[in-house]
Amino acid sequence: MTELNAIELEDVVKEYLSHGEVVQAVKGVTLEIAEGEFFSLLGPSGCGKTTTMRMIAGFEEPSRGVVRLHGKDVTDVPPNKRDVNMVFQSYALFPHMSVWDNVAFGLKQKKTPQDEIKRRVGEMLEIVDLVGREKRRPREMSGGQQQRVALARALVNRPRALLLDEPLGALDLKLRQAMQIELKRIQREVGITFVYVTHDQSEALTMSDRIAVMNDGLVEQLAAPREIYERPATAFVAGFIGTSNLLKGTANGGTLKIGGGRVLVPGHEGDVTVTVRPEKITIGTGEPEPGVSSVRGTVSEMVYLGTYNSYSVKLPDGAEITVFEQNAHDATATAERGDSVWLSWQAQHSYVIGS
Amino acid sequence: MKRLTPYLLALPSWMWLAIFLVVPMVAMASVSLQTGNAIDGFVMTFSFSNFGDALSRYSTQLLRSLLYGGLATLAMLLIGYPVAYWIAFKAGARKSMYLFLLLLPFFVSFVLRTISWSFLLADNGILFGTLKSWGVLPEGFHVLATTVAVVGGLTYNFLPFMILPIYVALERVDPRVVEAAQDLYASRTAAFRRVVLPLSLPGVFAGVLMTFVPATADPVNAQVLGGTENTMIGNIIQTAYLTNLDYPTASALSFTLMAVLLVGIFVYARALGTENVLEAAAR
C-alpha cells in the first residue's frame, strides 16, 4: 500500500453560467499531490489554475469530479471544515486586527487552549521573523512583512496542505527573489505540502518539486521542473516556459532539411515540430563539423544583456531563431547585425513535440 | 505670494463657515441670554436663568425627544443593517438600482411624505378602515397620535441615512478577507461576527450619528403623526420661535439640545472605541 496522497483531484470540472452560456473554467483536471511536495500550478491568467486551487480550498464546488484530501472525499465539505489553509493573493489580512490576532485567528476558531495559542503563535512569528511586531496593524507594515503575516496565519494551524495563490505577485523583484528562497526554507522546516499557483515560470521552476502547466482549463504537462524545461510535452509548454525555438518540417531518414542545413531527429519520420532552447545553440561563422544539427541564417538583431548576448537569426525560410551566447570570454560578440552565421547544436538538444 | 496661495484658495470656504455657521451661532447665543418681547424688542441682560427656566418647563419634551430619537435609531439600525448587507453582498449587478430605489422617496418633499403616512394610518383610512370593516382589527384600534406612529415616522423618514453609510462600509469589505476567515475555520456566523461586523462599525457609527441627531430634533413627525400627547422638543422650539416669538427661550432650548446631543455623541464614540469621532463619521 502506498502512502496516501495529500491532495487528489479526479476529473474535476468547473462550469460557470455567463450571459446565459455555460463556460468551462476547468475542463477535467486529474492530479495527485504527494505528502510534503512543493507543487505548482503554472499557467497564464484565465487558464483555470486559481479556480482549481479554490476547489481544493472549498471556495468553489466542482460541477463534476471528486476532491480528496488524504484519501477522504471532501467535495461537499465547506472551507472552514477542510484541513487546508490558504495564503491569498494580496494577503487578505484582517485589517482591524493586530499581527498577533491575525495569526491567532485560526487557532481561536478551533478553540485551542489559551496557553497553546500563545506558544504556537510565538513560535510561528519567530519562524517568519516578525518577533517584536505583534501589535502592529497590517496597514502599518511593508508588503514583504504582510506577506509573512499571511504565511504565518495559515501555517500556525499546521494544515495538511498550504495553498498559495500568487503570493509574491505584489512584491518587487528583489523582495520576490528573497521570498522565494524564504518560502522554500519554511516549507522544508515545517514539512507541509505546498500548492503554489503562479503565472511566473521562473518562480515555478526555482521552487517546485513538480509543476502542472495549465492552459485553457486543462493540464498540458505534469512533471518535474527539469523535465518540463528540457522536454516540453506540447508547443504551448515549450512556448510558455522560458524562450524556445520551434522548427517545423518533414523528417526524412531522421533528418529535417531546414534553412540550408539539417536538424537531426533520429527515429522520427514525417511532419514534426522540434524545439531547441536558445542557450543550447552555438553561433559561429565557420561551417560546423558534421554529426550535429546545423542551420544557416542572418543575424537580424543582437542584444547585449550583460551575462549573455541574445541573437535573433533569420533563416532563409523566414523562421526566426533566438540564440543566447554566454558572455564568458571577452566583451566582443561573435557576430553583428547583418552577419551571415551558422547555428549548431547537439542532436539530443532537439526535442520533438508531437508529429 | 506662493506660500499664501493655499490659504487664499481656502478663503471662500472659511468665509462660508464664518457667515453661515459662526455668525448665526453667536447671534443665537446672544439672543438666548436676552430678555424682552417681540413688540418692545429684546435687550441683552445676560440672564442665564433663561436656560434653567426653559429646561425645567420642557424637560419632559426633551427627554421624550431623546427617547423617540433613540428608539427610532435602534429601529433603523435593525432594519437598515440587513438591507445594507444585502445590497452590498447579494444584490450583484442590480446594486445601483436598489440604491436608487432607496433614494427615490427623497424626490418627494419630507413634509408631504409624512402627511401621506397620516392618511395611510388614519383611524378609518385606507388601511385600518378596510381591516376594521373586515373585522380583522377591533373598532377602537388606532395608531395615529401614538408613540408608535411618531417613532415609525422617524424611522421611515431617516432610514436611508442609516443604510447608506453602512452600505459604504460593507461595500469596502474585501470578500477575500471574509473567505480568509472561513478558510481559518470560522463558520459563516463567526466570520460575520469577527470580521464583517467590526469592519462595518465605522459605517454604523456614521449612520447612527446621521439619524439620531436629526430624528431627535425633528418637529414634523411629532406634529403630523403624534397628536398632542407626543410633542417633541423640536415642536416646542418651533412654536417658541414662530408662534410665541419668544426668541430667548427658543435659543436657549436649541443650545441645550445641541449640548445634550454633542455630549451623547462623545459618550457614544467613547463606548464604541472610536478615537476620532469626526474621522469615523467622514469615513
Image (spheres, rainbow, N blue to C red):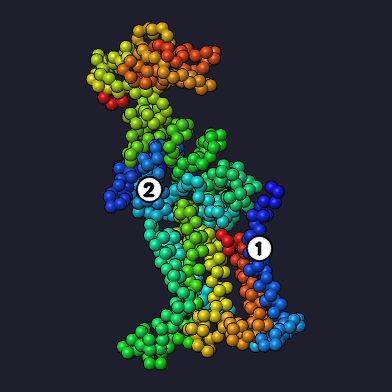
Secondary structure at badge 1 equals helix
Above/below status of A181 relative to A248: below
Residue B38, image x, y percentages: 66, 86
- The span from disc 2 to disc 1 (Cα, nearest Å) is 60 Å
Residue at the bottom extreme of this rendering: B140
Residue nearer the viewer, B168 or B34: B34
Please report the residue visible at 52 percent of the width from the left and 15 percent of the height from the top: A328
* Amino acid bearing label 1: Met
Please report the residue visible at 70 percent of the width from the left and 51 percent of the height from the top: B4
Residue A38, image x, y percentages: 45, 37
Q: Please state if A339 lies on the left or on the right of A138 as rendered.
A: left
- Mark 2 and mark 1, same subunit? no
Residue nearer the viewer, B96 or B240: B240
Residue B145, image x, y percentages: 48, 87
Residue B108, image x, y percentages: 44, 73
Report which quarter residue B69 is drawn in: bottom right
Above/below status of A27 relative to B213: above
Label number found at residue A205: none
Residue A119, visible in the rendered structure = no
**Which chain is mark 2 on?**
A
**Which chain is mark 1 on?**
B
Q: Which residue is mark 2?
A: A55
Residue B6, visible in the rendered structure = yes
Question: Which quarter of the rendered picture does the N terminus of chain A lie within?
Answer: top left
Secondary structure at badge 2 equals helix
Q: Which residue is mark 1?
A: B15
Please report the residue visible at 29 percent of the width from the left and 14 percent of the height from the top: A257
Q: How many marks?
A: 2
Above/below status of A140 relative to B187: above
Residue nearer the viewer, B203 or A189: B203
Residue nearer the viewer, A59 or A308: A308
**Do the numbered discs 2 and 1 sit on residues whose CB atoms are within 8 Å?**
no
